[in-house]
Image (tube, helix red, strand yellow):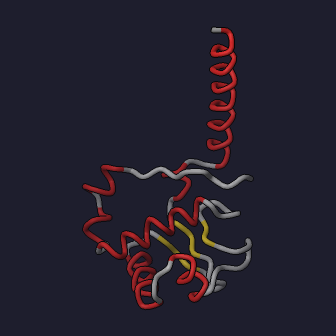
Amino acid sequence: MPHRMWIKLWVKEIIHGSTLKELDVEERAVWFELLCLAGDSITPGKICISEEMGYTTDQLCHLLKINSKLLQRSLQTLENVKKISQNGNGIIEIVNFDKYQGSEEDLLKRRDYMSNYMRAYRARKTDE
């Protein structure tokens, strides 16, 4: 499965939902970066190096360019408000990732649709 090129951000849920109430500005930044990592993951919705191994704290700090205190605080808050779950192998899973981002099957359908759309668009442009 190819990596996602983009993720959805749900505007009303972010602005009017729980995100602004539950997370401070630094934690929100970490949250959005974790969503991006989960979208770019080999296992969509999970932040991991492989299906059985997550990143270390040092690796995540380096990737996100933040200190370990902010990372630990953010992960604890995100887990407390049930936006993420963590397993013993360091894998961080975004709760309800497929619900908000769509399944891999949905993603493939959208890519096929857009590919066909662009092919037809280019064909029309060359005919003009």
Residue closer to the observer: 38 or 67: 67
Residue at figure coordinates x 53%, y 51% from the top left: 101
In the rendered image, which quarter is residue 127 located in?
top right
- The location of residue 96, given as percent across then percent down, is 50, 59
Instruction: Return the residue found at the far top.
Output: 128
Picture layout, residue 45 above or below residue 125: below
Residue closer to the observer: 13 or 27: 27
Total marks in image: 0
- The location of residue 69, given as percent across then percent down, is 42, 91
Q: Is residue 83 left or right of residue 97?
A: left
Picture layout, residue 108 above or below residue 77: above
Residue at figure coordinates x 60%, y 81% from the top left: 87
Residue at figure coordinates x 68%, y 31% from the top left: 115
- The location of residue 58, given as percent across then percent down, is 58, 89
- The location of residue 2, given as percent across then percent down, is 72, 52
Picture layout, residue 13 above or below residue 22: above
Residue at figure coordinates x 65%, y 64% from the top left: 41
Residue closer to the observer: 3 or 118: 118
